[in-house]
Structure formats: C-alpha cells, structure tokens
Image: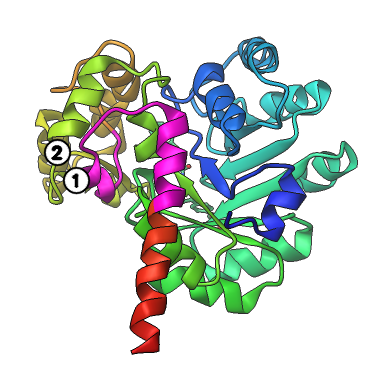
Amino acid sequence: MFRTNLCSILGIEYPILQGGMAWVSDAYLAAAVSQAGGLGLIAAGHLQDPQELRSQIRKARELTSKPFGVNVMLMNPAAPQLMDVVIEEGVSVVTTGAGNPGKYLSRLREAGIKVIPVVPSVALAKRIEREGAHALIVEGTEAGGHIGELTTMALVPQVVDAVSIPVVAAGGVADGRGFLAALALGAQGVQMGTRFAASVECRVHENWKEVYLKAGDRDTVVTGRSTGHPVRIIKNRLAREFIKLESQGASLEKLDVLGVGALRRAALEGDIDMGSVMAGQVVGLIREIKPVRDIIHDVLTQAGDELERLLVLKKG
Ligand code: TUI
C-alpha cells in the first residue's frame, strides 16, 4: 500500500519517517515506528556524550530488528563525534538538520549508511544531491522546531523538479490527507514529527502531550527570527517573553539565558509555561494520543479513502 522506491532504498514497508526530535524521540519511539513498518529516528540533537547515542542505538536494536536511523542536528557541537558513533555502530540511515552535511557524506556512504539531509531550499537540495545524498527531506516552515522560510506546498514540487533522488515531504503532515497531498506534490514519502510525539510510545512528558491535545491552529509561533535561527514552538509565557526581548533588540546573550535548556525543561520536566514546547502547525489536528501502529494505519487508510474520493470526482 503506497509503496514507493524510497521503501526499497530504506528497506521499510511504508514511506513514513518519524522526525528526529531532540529530547523527544528516543530509542523506544524510533523502535516502535520501525517495528510498525515506518522508519524510526533516534534524535541526537540534544546529546553531548557520544556514548549516550551508542547506548540508544543498542537499545533500539534490542527492540527491533528492522532498519532505523539517527538524526544528527548539525548545529550541535558534538556532531562530529556523534557521526563517528553512527558509523561505528553501522546504523541504517542518517538524517541531518540545520546545516549542510557535505563534509560527512563520503564517510557515511563508504560505511553503507543511507544519508537523507533536511533541506529548506532548492539550492541546497541541488548541492547536496551532487555531494551524494541518497534522498532529501524537504521541510516546510509549517514544521515544528528549527525551520526554514518556504512552505511545504511551494517547496516540495520545486525540489522534486530540481533533483532526481527521492524527496520526503515534511512540515504540515499529520494525517492521511497530508500524506496523499505530499505524494501528489511528487514526494515519495513523508516525515511526521508532531504526530509521533503525540503517541503512546513517545516518552516526552505528559504535560507536553496535554498541550498538543488542547492546541489549535494558531497556537504556535516562531521565535528566534532575529537570531537567524527561527524555531516554531507553542505560544506560552516563554514564547511571549522571548519575542518581546527580540522586539527590544536584545542581545544573543540575553536571549540565550531564556532559551538554553528550555527544550529540556518542557520535554523532560514538563514545564510547559517557561519551557520550549516545539510543535508544527498541524498540532491543531492532534486530538488523541494513539499507539504508533494506529497512527501509521490511520494515515494509510485515510490516504486510501481520500484517493478513492478523488478518483470518483475525476470520473465526474
Ligand atoms: O533540525 C530541524 N529541526 C530542529 S533541530 C532542533 S534541536 C534544537 N533547536 C533549537 C534549540 C534547541 C534544540 C529542533 N528542531 N529541522 C530540520 C531543518 N533543517 N529545518 C531547516 C533546516 C536547515 C536549515 C538550513 C537545513 C539546512 C540549512 O542549511 C543552511 C546552510 O546552507 O548551511
């Protein structure tokens, strides 16, 4: 069902990737998604100790024999050491975010690891294809966390036209309608973050999940535009104070005081007031915390139903 070439490249059943979310997606979530036929990703964005990543990878291996991946956030100062561990452990797939992974590509390829960088533009997509990526995650500004400027709807078809490797659409996808739309734009799969964070298997703090259930379409906001590192989070006291400081032209140091540790505070400690609750704009679609298996099943079923409806429309 909806099997694409991406499934063969990654050795997965369904073309659904789980976003690698720092402090949110650990070995348990990644293994659950892979076990259900998608591609789970262990996030390393928050890890400073490479040995911690090693034990996460080994944990996931205990939980599933299916392929899974690691997401390395390139702004993390520990990224080079984390890449070493990924190579030593022979993980199936690496996704990267927040930068150009060019300098790691040949080593990862030589180790037989599939590399799927997140790109926010056509220019970077073309460059990374030339450098040897196996596929690309094209992420629109609807996504949660660190984001680019263009929307998924506008960016995905432009990248699809510009490259010949498979494209995975991310940002704004949380159900079967988004999945089908992404395929219609030429993507061979989707990546979902917010939807999988709101799963039974995700070990993020319960307060975070509660926030997702209550949130509506206008409840996210972009912080950090003035710093050059825009981050979409739930509108809370932290977001309001951060944006106020930015509008007053606050220094990076001052903003850092508010921002550093904020994601950990929300995800681990459940501080949903002064913590950074990252979420995509689709958070308004999250109405239930579901098991990962049901999330994937429901996406595929809804996509099938919607496709049938469109085919009836086409017949007129
Ligand atoms: O990486 C993400 N989203 C993330 S990472 C993260 S961890 C964190 N962030 C802030 C504070 C504390 C922890 C939270 N969310 N998404 C993938 C993504 N990558 N979105 C946009 C990009 C991107 C941006 C610029 C990729 C490449 C790029 O290249 C610039 C260049 O030309 O080098």
Magenta stretch: residue 236 in it? no
Picture quarter with the N terminus: bottom right
Q: Picture coordinates of residue 12 (x, y %)?
A: 68, 42
- Magenta: predominant secondary structure element? helix
Q: Is mark 2 within 8 Å of ligand 1?
A: no
Picture quarter with the C terminus: bottom left
**Residue 284's mark?**
1
Magenta stretch: residue 289 in it? yes
C-beta proximity under 8 Å, tags 1 and 2: yes
Q: Is mark 1 within 8 Å of ligand 1?
A: no
Which residue: 42% across, 68% down? 307
Q: Which residue is mark 2?
A: 215
Residue type highlighted by circle 1: Gly
> Which region shows up in magenta?
278-301
Q: Picture coordinates of residue 9 (x, y %)?
A: 76, 51
Q: Classify residue 258 by image quadrant.
A: top left
